[in-house]
Image: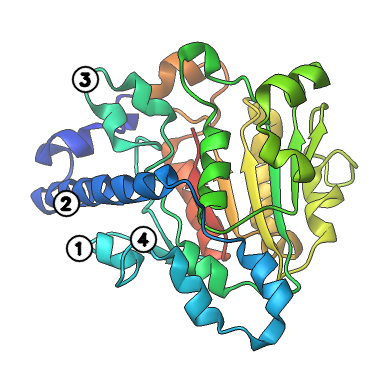
Amino acid sequence: FENSKGCPIWETPEASTQENYDNLQAFLKDIYEYSNTMQKELDVDEPIPDFLKTMRREGHSINQTELCKAARPHPEGLQALFPSHQLSQTPSGYVEPLLTPMRHPEFCQEGGAYNAFRVDYIIHDFERMCLNLKPHSRAIFVDMGASLEFHVSQGVPPPIMSLLNSFEKNGFHFDHIYALESTKADPNDVYKKLLPEKFFPSYHWINTGVSSDPKDRLNPLRSIISKFEEDDLIIVKLDIDTSQIEVPLAKQLLEDDTINKLVDHFYFEHHVQLYEMKHAWDKSWVGSVQESFELMNGLRNKGVAAHFWV
Protein backbone atom coordinates (compact mmCIF):
# COMPACT_ATOMS: atom_id res chain seq x y z
CA PHE A 1 0.00 0.00 0.00
CA GLU A 2 2.93 2.34 0.68
CA ASN A 3 3.82 2.11 -3.01
CA SER A 4 0.45 3.56 -4.04
CA LYS A 5 1.39 7.09 -3.03
CA GLY A 6 0.74 9.46 -5.90
CA CYS A 7 2.30 12.73 -4.76
CA PRO A 8 6.04 11.95 -4.37
CA ILE A 9 6.66 12.18 -8.13
CA TRP A 10 5.76 15.88 -7.85
CA GLU A 11 7.81 16.43 -4.71
CA THR A 12 11.22 14.84 -5.22
CA PRO A 13 13.39 13.45 -8.04
CA GLU A 14 14.06 10.40 -5.88
CA ALA A 15 10.50 9.17 -6.47
CA SER A 16 11.30 8.49 -10.15
CA THR A 17 14.16 10.14 -12.04
CA GLN A 18 15.56 13.64 -12.31
CA GLU A 19 14.35 13.83 -15.91
CA ASN A 20 10.81 12.83 -14.96
CA TYR A 21 10.76 15.30 -12.09
CA ASP A 22 12.01 18.15 -14.31
CA ASN A 23 9.40 17.31 -16.95
CA LEU A 24 6.64 17.31 -14.35
CA GLN A 25 7.73 20.67 -12.96
CA ALA A 26 7.77 22.12 -16.46
CA PHE A 27 4.31 20.68 -17.09
CA LEU A 28 3.04 22.18 -13.83
CA LYS A 29 4.07 25.62 -15.06
CA ASP A 30 2.21 24.93 -18.30
CA ILE A 31 -0.92 23.97 -16.33
CA TYR A 32 -0.76 27.35 -14.54
CA GLU A 33 -0.58 29.15 -17.88
CA TYR A 34 -3.41 27.09 -19.36
CA SER A 35 -5.60 27.52 -16.29
CA ASN A 36 -5.06 31.29 -16.16
CA THR A 37 -5.79 31.62 -19.87
CA MET A 38 -8.99 29.60 -19.67
CA GLN A 39 -10.12 31.52 -16.57
CA LYS A 40 -9.75 34.80 -18.44
CA GLU A 41 -12.07 33.40 -21.11
CA LEU A 42 -14.59 32.37 -18.45
CA ASP A 43 -14.48 35.88 -17.01
CA VAL A 44 -15.47 37.40 -20.35
CA ASP A 45 -19.16 38.33 -20.35
CA GLU A 46 -19.86 37.15 -23.89
CA PRO A 47 -19.16 33.49 -24.66
CA ILE A 48 -18.10 32.22 -28.07
CA PRO A 49 -21.29 31.91 -30.18
CA ASP A 50 -22.80 28.43 -30.27
CA PHE A 51 -20.78 26.51 -32.89
CA LEU A 52 -23.51 24.04 -33.75
CA LYS A 53 -26.17 26.72 -34.06
CA THR A 54 -23.93 28.62 -36.46
CA MET A 55 -23.14 25.48 -38.47
CA ARG A 56 -26.80 24.47 -38.66
CA ARG A 57 -27.72 27.93 -39.89
CA GLU A 58 -24.92 28.29 -42.43
CA GLY A 59 -24.71 24.63 -43.51
CA HIS A 60 -21.80 23.35 -45.56
CA SER A 61 -21.08 26.82 -46.94
CA ILE A 62 -19.37 27.85 -43.72
CA ASN A 63 -15.58 27.99 -43.42
CA GLN A 64 -15.34 25.63 -40.47
CA THR A 65 -11.61 26.08 -40.01
CA GLU A 66 -12.02 29.81 -39.50
CA LEU A 67 -15.09 29.33 -37.33
CA CYS A 68 -13.30 26.98 -34.96
CA LYS A 69 -10.29 29.25 -34.51
CA ALA A 70 -12.49 31.22 -32.12
CA ALA A 71 -11.88 28.42 -29.59
CA ARG A 72 -8.10 28.81 -29.68
CA PRO A 73 -6.76 29.83 -26.28
CA HIS A 74 -3.59 31.05 -28.01
CA PRO A 75 -3.08 32.46 -31.54
CA GLU A 76 -0.81 29.51 -32.37
CA GLY A 77 -3.15 26.90 -30.92
CA LEU A 78 -3.52 25.08 -27.63
CA GLN A 79 -0.13 23.39 -27.84
CA ALA A 80 1.56 26.79 -27.71
CA LEU A 81 0.58 27.00 -24.03
CA PHE A 82 2.55 23.81 -23.35
CA PRO A 83 6.21 24.37 -24.27
CA SER A 84 7.08 21.32 -22.17
CA HIS A 85 5.36 19.17 -24.84
CA GLN A 86 3.81 16.97 -22.16
CA LEU A 87 0.37 16.73 -23.79
CA SER A 88 -1.31 13.52 -24.89
CA GLN A 89 -3.39 13.31 -28.05
CA THR A 90 -6.79 11.77 -28.85
CA PRO A 91 -9.30 12.10 -31.71
CA SER A 92 -10.84 14.91 -29.63
CA GLY A 93 -7.52 16.74 -29.64
CA TYR A 94 -4.91 17.35 -26.98
CA VAL A 95 -5.55 16.21 -23.40
CA GLU A 96 -3.60 16.12 -20.16
CA PRO A 97 -1.33 13.11 -19.54
CA LEU A 98 -2.63 10.51 -17.10
CA LEU A 99 -0.82 11.14 -13.82
CA THR A 100 -1.19 10.63 -10.10
CA PRO A 101 -2.66 11.89 -7.80
CA MET A 102 -5.51 11.55 -10.33
CA ARG A 103 -6.54 15.20 -9.80
CA HIS A 104 -4.89 18.63 -9.81
CA PRO A 105 -1.17 18.35 -8.90
CA GLU A 106 -1.55 21.17 -6.38
CA PHE A 107 -3.57 18.72 -4.29
CA CYS A 108 -0.13 17.44 -3.27
CA GLN A 109 0.91 20.74 -1.74
CA GLU A 110 0.52 21.54 1.94
CA GLY A 111 -3.03 22.67 2.60
CA GLY A 112 -4.03 21.45 -0.84
CA ALA A 113 -7.34 19.83 0.14
CA TYR A 114 -9.27 22.59 -1.65
CA ASN A 115 -7.41 21.63 -4.82
CA ALA A 116 -8.95 18.16 -4.65
CA PHE A 117 -12.06 19.53 -6.34
CA ARG A 118 -10.42 21.64 -9.04
CA VAL A 119 -11.06 20.63 -12.62
CA ASP A 120 -8.94 23.30 -14.32
CA TYR A 121 -6.08 20.84 -14.78
CA ILE A 122 -8.27 18.88 -17.24
CA ILE A 123 -7.27 19.98 -20.73
CA HIS A 124 -9.82 20.45 -23.50
CA ASP A 125 -8.95 21.09 -27.12
CA PHE A 126 -12.11 22.98 -28.01
CA GLU A 127 -10.82 23.92 -31.47
CA ARG A 128 -10.31 20.26 -32.40
CA MET A 129 -13.72 19.33 -30.98
CA CYS A 130 -15.29 22.07 -33.11
CA LEU A 131 -13.53 20.81 -36.22
CA ASN A 132 -14.98 17.33 -35.56
CA LEU A 133 -18.56 18.65 -35.67
CA LYS A 134 -20.95 18.33 -38.60
CA PRO A 135 -24.01 20.55 -39.20
CA HIS A 136 -26.22 17.60 -38.22
CA SER A 137 -24.25 16.79 -35.03
CA ARG A 138 -25.91 16.93 -31.65
CA ALA A 139 -24.15 17.84 -28.39
CA ILE A 140 -25.02 15.43 -25.58
CA PHE A 141 -23.93 15.32 -21.94
CA VAL A 142 -24.68 12.24 -19.81
CA ASP A 143 -24.03 12.83 -16.11
CA MET A 144 -24.14 9.73 -13.89
CA GLY A 145 -23.96 10.98 -10.32
CA ALA A 146 -25.52 14.37 -10.98
CA SER A 147 -26.03 15.88 -7.53
CA LEU A 148 -25.88 19.67 -7.75
CA GLU A 149 -25.23 19.92 -4.01
CA PHE A 150 -22.05 17.84 -4.02
CA HIS A 151 -19.15 19.73 -2.34
CA VAL A 152 -21.33 22.81 -1.77
CA SER A 153 -21.15 22.28 2.02
CA GLN A 154 -17.37 22.53 1.68
CA GLY A 155 -17.63 25.93 0.05
CA VAL A 156 -16.77 24.57 -3.39
CA PRO A 157 -19.02 25.12 -6.42
CA PRO A 158 -20.16 21.83 -7.95
CA PRO A 159 -17.36 20.77 -10.33
CA ILE A 160 -19.95 19.78 -12.93
CA MET A 161 -21.04 23.42 -13.19
CA SER A 162 -17.45 24.47 -13.83
CA LEU A 163 -17.27 21.92 -16.63
CA LEU A 164 -20.58 22.89 -18.23
CA ASN A 165 -19.70 26.58 -18.02
CA SER A 166 -16.36 25.93 -19.69
CA PHE A 167 -18.01 24.14 -22.60
CA GLU A 168 -20.59 26.89 -22.97
CA LYS A 169 -18.04 29.71 -22.88
CA ASN A 170 -16.07 27.94 -25.60
CA GLY A 171 -18.95 27.58 -28.04
CA PHE A 172 -20.56 24.28 -27.03
CA HIS A 173 -24.21 24.42 -25.95
CA PHE A 174 -25.61 21.00 -25.18
CA ASP A 175 -28.81 19.91 -26.91
CA HIS A 176 -29.46 17.46 -24.08
CA ILE A 177 -28.03 17.06 -20.58
CA TYR A 178 -29.18 13.79 -19.02
CA ALA A 179 -28.62 14.10 -15.26
CA LEU A 180 -29.04 10.82 -13.36
CA GLU A 181 -28.88 10.91 -9.56
CA SER A 182 -29.99 8.30 -7.03
CA THR A 183 -30.24 10.64 -4.02
CA LYS A 184 -33.78 11.95 -3.89
CA ALA A 185 -34.14 15.68 -4.42
CA ASP A 186 -37.12 17.97 -4.62
CA PRO A 187 -37.42 19.12 -8.26
CA ASN A 188 -38.36 22.56 -6.92
CA ASP A 189 -34.94 22.76 -5.29
CA VAL A 190 -33.19 21.50 -8.42
CA TYR A 191 -34.85 23.97 -10.76
CA LYS A 192 -35.44 26.94 -8.45
CA LYS A 193 -32.26 26.94 -6.35
CA LEU A 194 -29.51 24.77 -7.81
CA LEU A 195 -29.61 24.69 -11.61
CA PRO A 196 -28.73 27.89 -13.50
CA GLU A 197 -31.66 28.96 -15.67
CA LYS A 198 -29.54 28.97 -18.83
CA PHE A 199 -29.46 25.16 -18.73
CA PHE A 200 -33.24 24.71 -18.44
CA PRO A 201 -33.90 24.10 -22.17
CA SER A 202 -31.55 21.11 -22.32
CA TYR A 203 -31.60 19.66 -18.79
CA HIS A 204 -33.32 16.35 -18.02
CA TRP A 205 -33.36 15.60 -14.27
CA ILE A 206 -33.66 11.80 -13.85
CA ASN A 207 -33.85 11.17 -10.11
CA THR A 208 -32.96 7.48 -10.05
CA GLY A 209 -29.85 5.36 -9.82
CA VAL A 210 -28.14 3.72 -12.75
CA SER A 211 -27.54 0.05 -13.46
CA SER A 212 -24.43 -1.69 -14.77
CA ASP A 213 -26.50 -4.49 -16.32
CA PRO A 214 -26.07 -4.12 -20.11
CA LYS A 215 -29.69 -5.24 -20.57
CA ASP A 216 -31.21 -2.88 -17.99
CA ARG A 217 -33.01 0.20 -19.27
CA LEU A 218 -31.39 2.17 -16.41
CA ASN A 219 -27.98 1.53 -17.93
CA PRO A 220 -27.38 4.86 -19.75
CA LEU A 221 -24.84 3.30 -22.09
CA ARG A 222 -27.70 1.19 -23.45
CA SER A 223 -30.76 3.39 -23.08
CA ILE A 224 -29.28 6.81 -23.93
CA ILE A 225 -25.83 6.78 -25.52
CA SER A 226 -26.49 3.92 -27.94
CA LYS A 227 -29.32 5.94 -29.50
CA PHE A 228 -26.95 8.57 -30.89
CA GLU A 229 -24.49 8.62 -33.80
CA GLU A 230 -20.73 8.85 -34.27
CA ASP A 231 -21.02 12.40 -35.63
CA ASP A 232 -22.62 13.55 -32.36
CA LEU A 233 -20.51 15.08 -29.60
CA ILE A 234 -21.08 12.84 -26.58
CA ILE A 235 -19.65 13.67 -23.17
CA VAL A 236 -20.01 11.23 -20.26
CA LYS A 237 -19.29 11.78 -16.56
CA LEU A 238 -19.38 8.85 -14.11
CA ASP A 239 -19.09 9.53 -10.37
CA ILE A 240 -21.66 7.65 -8.30
CA ASP A 241 -19.28 6.60 -5.48
CA THR A 242 -20.41 2.97 -5.78
CA SER A 243 -17.60 0.88 -7.20
CA GLN A 244 -19.66 -2.25 -7.79
CA ILE A 245 -21.76 -0.29 -10.30
CA GLU A 246 -19.44 2.31 -11.78
CA VAL A 247 -16.43 0.05 -12.42
CA PRO A 248 -18.49 -2.42 -14.52
CA LEU A 249 -19.95 0.56 -16.41
CA ALA A 250 -16.47 1.89 -17.15
CA LYS A 251 -15.32 -1.56 -18.28
CA GLN A 252 -18.41 -1.91 -20.46
CA LEU A 253 -17.50 1.37 -22.13
CA LEU A 254 -13.96 0.07 -22.69
CA GLU A 255 -14.99 -3.33 -24.05
CA ASP A 256 -18.09 -2.50 -26.11
CA ASP A 257 -16.87 -0.96 -29.35
CA THR A 258 -20.42 -0.14 -30.42
CA ILE A 259 -20.56 2.27 -27.46
CA ASN A 260 -17.01 3.60 -27.09
CA LYS A 261 -16.96 4.67 -30.73
CA LEU A 262 -19.76 7.11 -29.86
CA VAL A 263 -18.18 8.71 -26.77
CA ASP A 264 -15.81 11.65 -27.17
CA HIS A 265 -14.93 12.51 -23.54
CA PHE A 266 -15.27 10.40 -20.39
CA TYR A 267 -14.74 11.74 -16.85
CA PHE A 268 -14.41 9.13 -14.10
CA GLU A 269 -13.47 9.33 -10.43
CA HIS A 270 -12.06 5.83 -10.08
CA HIS A 271 -11.84 4.86 -6.40
CA VAL A 272 -8.66 2.79 -6.23
CA GLN A 273 -6.01 2.26 -3.56
CA LEU A 274 -4.35 5.66 -3.79
CA TYR A 275 -2.78 6.65 -0.48
CA GLU A 276 -3.63 10.35 -0.68
CA MET A 277 -7.35 9.57 -1.13
CA LYS A 278 -7.59 6.98 1.66
CA HIS A 279 -9.62 9.36 3.85
CA ALA A 280 -12.32 9.60 1.18
CA TRP A 281 -12.14 6.32 -0.70
CA ASP A 282 -11.19 3.60 1.78
CA LYS A 283 -14.78 2.36 2.10
CA SER A 284 -15.36 2.20 -1.63
CA TRP A 285 -12.04 1.59 -3.32
CA VAL A 286 -11.54 -1.45 -5.52
CA GLY A 287 -8.34 -2.25 -7.39
CA SER A 288 -4.98 -0.59 -7.79
CA VAL A 289 -3.67 2.63 -9.30
CA GLN A 290 -2.09 0.55 -12.05
CA GLU A 291 -5.46 -0.98 -12.93
CA SER A 292 -6.97 2.50 -13.13
CA PHE A 293 -4.26 3.68 -15.51
CA GLU A 294 -4.74 0.58 -17.64
CA LEU A 295 -8.48 1.31 -17.84
CA MET A 296 -8.10 4.98 -18.71
CA ASN A 297 -5.25 4.40 -21.15
CA GLY A 298 -7.26 1.60 -22.75
CA LEU A 299 -10.14 4.01 -23.28
CA ARG A 300 -7.81 6.55 -24.86
CA ASN A 301 -6.49 3.84 -27.16
CA LYS A 302 -10.10 3.21 -28.20
CA GLY A 303 -10.47 6.90 -29.11
CA VAL A 304 -12.19 8.08 -25.92
CA ALA A 305 -10.59 11.12 -24.25
CA ALA A 306 -10.66 9.72 -20.70
CA HIS A 307 -9.99 12.03 -17.74
CA PHE A 308 -9.72 11.52 -14.00
CA TRP A 309 -12.67 13.27 -12.37
CA VAL A 310 -12.89 14.78 -8.88
As shown in the figure, which amino acid type bears the numbered disc 4?
Pro
Numbered disc 3: secondary structure: loop
Q: Which mark is residue 26?
A: 2
> Considering only order in the chain, which callout, 1 or 4, is on the residue closer to the N terminus?
4
Q: Nearer the viewer, residue 77 or 18?
A: 77
Determine which quarter of the picture holds residue 247.
top right
Q: Is residue 83 left or right of residue 118?
A: left
Q: Which mark is residue 73?
A: 4
Q: Nearer the viewer, residue 69 or 35?
A: 69
> Considering only order in the chain, which callout, 3 or 2, is on the residue closer to the N terminus?
2
Question: Dot 3 surroundings within 10 Å: few (below 14), some, or many (20 or more)?
Answer: few
Foreground mark, 3 or 4?
Answer: 4
Per the model, the C-alpha gap separating discs 3 and 4 is 30 Å
Question: Mark 1 = which residue?
Answer: 83
As shown in the figure, which amino acid type bears the numbered disc 3?
Glu
Is there any visible trace of residue 310 in the rendered image?
A: yes
Q: Is residue 296 left or right of residue 139?
A: left
Per the model, the C-alpha gap separating discs 2 and 3 is 20 Å
Give the vertical position of 307 relative to 239 (above or below).
below
Are the residues tagged 2 and 3 within 8 Å (C-beta)?
A: no
Residue 285, position as x, y percentages in the image: 54, 25
Residue 142, position as x, y percentages in the image: 71, 45
Give the vertical position of 207 relative to 249 (above or below).
above
Residue 169, position as x, y percentages in the image: 52, 51
